Image: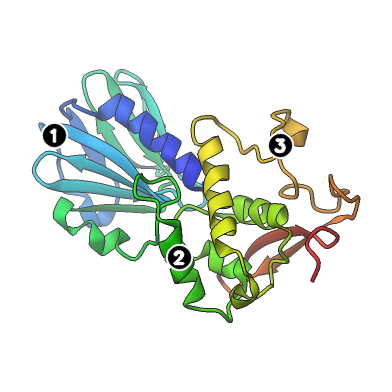
Amino acid sequence: MPEGDAVYRTATRLRSALDGRVLTRSDFRVPRHATADLTGRAVLTTLSRGKHLLTRVEGDLTVHTHLRMDGSWRIMAATGRAPAGDQVRLILANQQWQAMGVRLGMVDLVRTGDEARLIGHLGPDLLGPGWDPDEAVRRLRAAPGRTIGEALLDQRNLAGIGTIYRAETLFLRGIWPWKKVGEIEDLNGLVSLAQRLLAANKDHAGTVTTGDRRPANQTWVYGRAGRPCRRCGTRVSRGEMGTQPQERLILWCAGCQPR
């Protein structure tokens, strides 16, 4: 699933193609909004909120989308040909560009004043202008008996972290993923590191947490299951966390993140 930095970049691309331009076409290919038509309305802006995207349109309307596991937004010239089939779930086009939402996990059309109904549950956005580490820590501490690995992925605590940044953040802090939240003294340091990692990657493709942009050297543990840890040589472990059907991939180094 695309994480907060990838969604942030997607919002940037959508702003570049749509902001300030009048829609000449809108095509909602989801049953719930199949009859909706935004033609003739100008797009005001697109914002990212954690892993959610909010495209605000004239007339107090917001198009809310979520990429989930396989979704993406593709930008192409207005004269380009959209791919056939049911992969495209939404098209927003103006005289110059068309934005195609492919395999989107969520598509909603709501009043802008009602956005909170869709995203009001989210914790502080790691890449938002109102990032509040103290509030993120407060939310984490509200469930001290929960594992830190599960708590970091809960978007109600802090919005934007996925399996990649969870694994990398916990490795860099030397924390075993199954350690209880209440047993971690420096939660502020943990969430602040996560924020810095996402911020460092928000303006370029790919995820680099090691400082080395070479493809084989970009991460510490993610994508390296069974390979030697870059620090201590212990084989990187791979497992799953969470209860079915919400279990998610977790990677860690037993040497650097002792139980």
Task: Tell which of 237 and 80 is nearer to you.
Answer: 237
Locate the C terminus by quadrant.
Answer: bottom right
> Which amino acid type is marked by label 3?
Gln
Task: Tell which of 83 and 157 is nearer to you.
Answer: 157
Residue 87 image offset from top left, x and y in percent: 42, 43
| Side of 229 where 164 appears, left or right | left
* Residue 26 visible in the shown view: yes
**Colour basis:** rainbow
Q: Are marks 3 and 1 in contact (CB under 8 Å)?
A: no
Residue pictured at 31% horizontal, 30% vertical: 15
Labels 2 and 3: the sequence-earlier one: 2
Labels 3 and 1: the sequence-earlier one: 1
In whole angstroms, how far apart are the C-alphas of marks 3 and 1?
A: 43 Å
> Which amino acid type is marked by label 2?
Asn
Kindly identify which residue carries mark 1.
39
Labels 2 and 1: the sequence-earlier one: 1
Task: Give the structural element (helix, strand or loop) at label 2.
Answer: loop
> Which amino acid type is marked by label 1?
Thr
Kindly identify which residue carries mark 3.
218
